[in-house]
């Protein structure tokens, strides 16, 4: 497949469709209408954004804050609690239990045990996740203490995801990570002792300063820790990272490993993981047999997701939306200290049935295979015939295989899956900025 191997500025990882750049403030009314209407019968999830970090990584493109004082943190948690209160009364809830809950960031584990207990107490005054089959909580190793890990268990976390990224301290420092390797190894026994249903370790292929030797050592260290799953992302350069701003400003050349190297490292990592007993769950994740991800699998099959917190993304009843991305606007619209307040939605997009089909197909392809009958039953579209030219091109390039009842990616196709997905986008969404 012909493509530039250099890691340029721009989004590579596809997490939704249509592209976020196509969402508009003009469509907020559609989101409010969907939230105020009875639900469609699909699983329901909840996302909570905790936007605080000890440091901002140089490759980070999320909405995070590193200099908020204790009073401002409390202001945010009060606003988030108020938002949850408003959300809990929406008709779109429809009496549905939360199938999954996800605490993301930022760094949710930035909060103290006391703050976590107080936040969860306020949330549980309005919502209940006791029936959720998965409650995920993202952690940065250096923010953990033994007591805090126990707190996470006490508040109902079932799946803990640890942002290790790498084990080499020079690489962690060069990329702006807040933690160092001793903090990883200090926290790991506490995590094991707590007995979560599932623990994931995140790694990143192609961090600035990495080498083949260091990368292979990092993978071996992750395997020695024996987590339930290992997720490996390939370093990219979305527009709003520190690295990207320096590149676009002409201050530096792209410091990130090229795509060919990153994919070689990713492909290499899958082999020792398989030898250690892990199986392929997606283009990024190897899991122990039987480990499943409710959050991922439900989202990739069209579940509803109520998103809360600053700049968070959600979708309900065919309408995608994002909350206000600025601190003052988000907290101001919620008016947490009064009986007033309104949902802080900043932009939205109502998608068509065909766009819903494209969204589910490109996301599910990240698992490395598709079941055409699923799409013909749900959308009355034969995805092999509809995109026959694309599939034949990928087959010819050694990236895909067409079986009688399944579309499968080859190993090479799986390692570069995100680069394959835009070919399925509608013409008006090909070549546009993703975010």
Image (cartoon, rainbow, N blue to C red):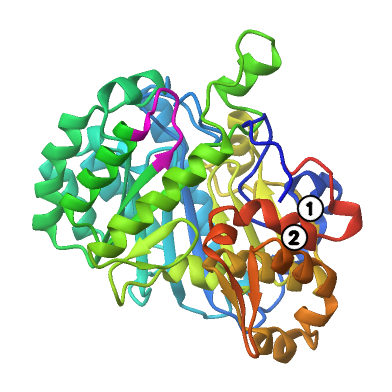
Q: Position of residue 253 (x, y in %)?
A: 61, 15
* Residue 397 in sight in this render: yes
The image quadrant that residue 271 belongs to is bottom left
Q: Residue at horizontal 67%, vertical 81%?
A: 40
* Residue at the image point whose x is 50% and y is 71% from the top: 297
Q: Position of residue 114 (x, y in %)?
A: 22, 42
To which quarter of the image does residue 181 belong?
top left
Q: Mark 1 — residue?
A: 28
Nearer the observer, 127 or 265: 265
Residue 369 falls within the magenta-colored stretch: no
Counting every numbered tag in the picture gives 2
Residue 395: which numbered mark, if any? none
Measure the alpha-carbon separation of dots 1 and 2. Answer: 5 Å
* Side of 299 where 396 appears, left or right: right
Residue 243, given in percent of the width and then of the height, sits at: 56, 21
Q: Categorize mark 2 by other alpha carbons within 10 Å: few (<14), some (14-19), many (20+).
A: many
Circle 2: element type: helix
The quarter of the picture where residue 353 lies is bottom right
Q: Measuring 74% from the left and 60% from the top, which residue is drawn there?
A: 32
Is 40 positioned to the left or the right of 53 in the image? right
Q: Residue furthest top?
A: 251
Q: Residue at x 67, y 57 (%)?
A: 16
Residue that extends furthest to the right in the rendered view of this protein: 428
Mark 1: few, some, or many residues within 10 Å (few <14, many ≥20)?
A: many
Q: Is residue 121 visible?
A: no
Left or right: 311, with 319 as reference point: left
User: Label 2: which residue?
Assistant: 31
The stretch of residues the image draws in magenta is 204-212
């Amino acid at each position: 497949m012909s493509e530039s191997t250099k890691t340029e500025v721009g989004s590579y990882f596809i997490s939704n469709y249509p592209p976020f750049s196509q969402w508009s403030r003009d469509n907020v009314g559609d989101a409010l209408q969907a939230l105020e209407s009875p639900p469609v019968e699909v699983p329901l999830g909840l996302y909570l954004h905790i936007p605080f970090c000890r440091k901002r990584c140089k490759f980070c493109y999320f909405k995070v804050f590193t200099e908020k004082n204790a009073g401002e943190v409390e202001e945010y948690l009060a606003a988030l609690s108020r938002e949850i209160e408003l959300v809990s009364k929406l008709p779109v809830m429809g009496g549905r239990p939360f199938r999954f809950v996800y605490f993301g960031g930022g760094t949710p584990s930035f909060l103290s045990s006391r703050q976590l207990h107080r936040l969860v107490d306020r949330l549980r005054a309005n919502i209940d996740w006791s029936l959720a089959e998965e409650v995920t909580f993202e952690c940065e190793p250096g923010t953990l203490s033994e007591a805090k890990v126990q707190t996470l268990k006490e508040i109902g976390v079932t799946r803990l995801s640890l942002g290790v990224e790498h084990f080499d301290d020079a690489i962690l420092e060069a990329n702006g990570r807040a933690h160092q390797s001793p903090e990883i190894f200090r926290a790991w026994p506490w995590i094991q002792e707590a007995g979560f249903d599932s623990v994931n370790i995140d790694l990143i292929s192609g961090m600035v300063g990495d080498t083949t030797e260091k990368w292979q050592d990092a993978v071996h260290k992750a395997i020695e820790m024996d987590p339930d799953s290992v997720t490996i992302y390939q370093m990219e350069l979305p527009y709003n990272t520190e690295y990207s701003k320096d590149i676009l400003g002409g201050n530096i050349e792209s410091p990130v490993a090229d795509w060919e190297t990153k994919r070689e490292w990713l492909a290499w990592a899958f082999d020792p993981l398989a030898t250690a007993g892990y199986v392929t769950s997606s283009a990024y994740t190897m899991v122990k047999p039987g480990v499943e991800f409710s959050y991922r699998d439900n989202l990739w099959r069209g579940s509803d997701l109520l998103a809360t917190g600053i700049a968070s993304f959600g979708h309900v009843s065919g309408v995608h939306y994002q909350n206000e991305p600025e601190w003052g606007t988000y907290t101001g619209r919620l008016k947490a200290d009064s009986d007033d307040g309104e949902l802080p939605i900043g932009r939205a997009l109502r998608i068509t049935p065909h766009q819903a089909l494209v969204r589910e197909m490109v996301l599910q392809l990240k698992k490395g295979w598709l079941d055409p009958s699923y799409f013909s039953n749900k959308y009355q579209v034969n995805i092999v015939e509809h995109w026959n030219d694309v599939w034949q091109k990928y087959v010819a390039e050694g990236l895909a295989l067409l079986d009688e009842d399944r579309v499968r990616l080859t190993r090479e196709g799986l390692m570069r899956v995100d680069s394959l997905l835009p070919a399925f986008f509608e013409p008006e969404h090909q070549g546009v900025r993703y975010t």
